Image (cartoon, rainbow, N blue to C red):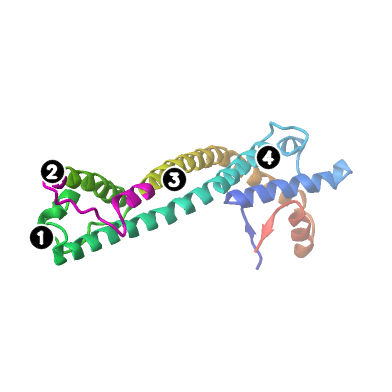
Amino acid sequence: MPYRRLPNTTPAVIRTLKTARDEWKNTPTPADRAITAEQWAQLDTAAPNNLLNRLLSEAGDVDLALAAQAPLTDNFSRTADRLAMFVSHFHQVLDLGIARGAFQPGARSYYGRDIAATAIPDLSSYDAIAEAAEAVVTGEARRQAVESDTGGYVAMQLPGADEVDVLRQQFLTLRSQSDQALVNTDRQREELQALYPEAQAVAVDICDTVEFFYRKDPDASSRRAKCERWGVVYV
């Protein structure tokens, strides 16, 4: 037995309201219109500040925010992965150099590691990547300052700390841009969500009104078909 499904998501509410709006426009005879003039006032395209137009505007703002956010988030994610790889390789090469005797055994301490550490720093989160990358840059500078005094400084290579720092600066810039985009998306979603309860209530009221308008149609299938033209959904 088919039953009515009330609009309970933003896309469903928008679809119901737009369908009712378009059907009103396609129904020139007032007596044949299944919704009230008051409901139509919330849908009229010519009234820019009515409910439907405000809802469409807010939904459009969310779409624009997501479109701006997506490439920034993707670029930041790829840069973070690359920076993590460079930091990992830096410490792996450092450990190999210590094993060969190319670096002093205590060199790990400059980069925030225990001198006897057997594992590279944690790189499992963006914060951890940023912290480990900064430690590479500042640690290399400290080691250079100390070991240059004794003439024993050997710069790390493949990758060098300068290569890590270039990626780190890109990471920090993209992270800031991505965070700003996320904040904007959240704000646009909150503005849309603030309008949703009113819009959903109007959409449900329209469904109730349409079903009441056609309540005397003796054929259930015909009645549902007429209601569907005004946005009522049956499943």
- Disc 1 + disc 2, Cβ < 8 Å: no
Graded by Cα atoms within 10 Å as few (under 14), some (14 to 19) or many (20 or more), the crowding at tag 2 reads few
Give the Cα distance between marks 3 and 2. 37 Å
- Residue indicated by mark 4: 52
Residue type beneath disc 1: Ala
Q: SS class of the residue under badge 3?
A: helix
Please state which of the two labelled residues, at mark 3 or mark 1, is closer to the viewer.
1
Q: Is residue 206 visible?
A: yes
Graded by Cα atoms within 10 Å as few (under 14), some (14 to 19) or many (20 or more), the crowding at tag 4 reads many
Q: Where is residue 19 in the image (x, y as percent from the top left)?
A: 74, 50
- Residue indicated by mark 3: 174
Quarter holding residue 205? top right
**Quick one: label 4 or label 1, which is nearer the N terminus?**
4
**Does residue 199 appear to the left or right of 33 in the view shown?**
left
Which residue occupies the extreme bottom position in the image? 1
Q: Nearer the viewer, residue 141 or 111?
A: 141
Residue type beneath disc 4: Leu
Q: Nearer the viewer, residue 150 or 37?
A: 150
Give the Cα distance between marks 3 and 1. 34 Å
**Quick one: label 4 or label 2, which is nearer the N terminus?**
4
Q: Where is residue 66 in the image (x, y as percent from the top left)?
A: 55, 47
Please state which of the two labelled residues, at mark 3 or mark 2, is closer to the viewer.
2
Give the Cα distance between marks 4 and 2. 73 Å
**Quick one: label 3 or label 2, which is nearer the N terminus?**
2
Give the Cα distance between marks 4 and 1. 66 Å
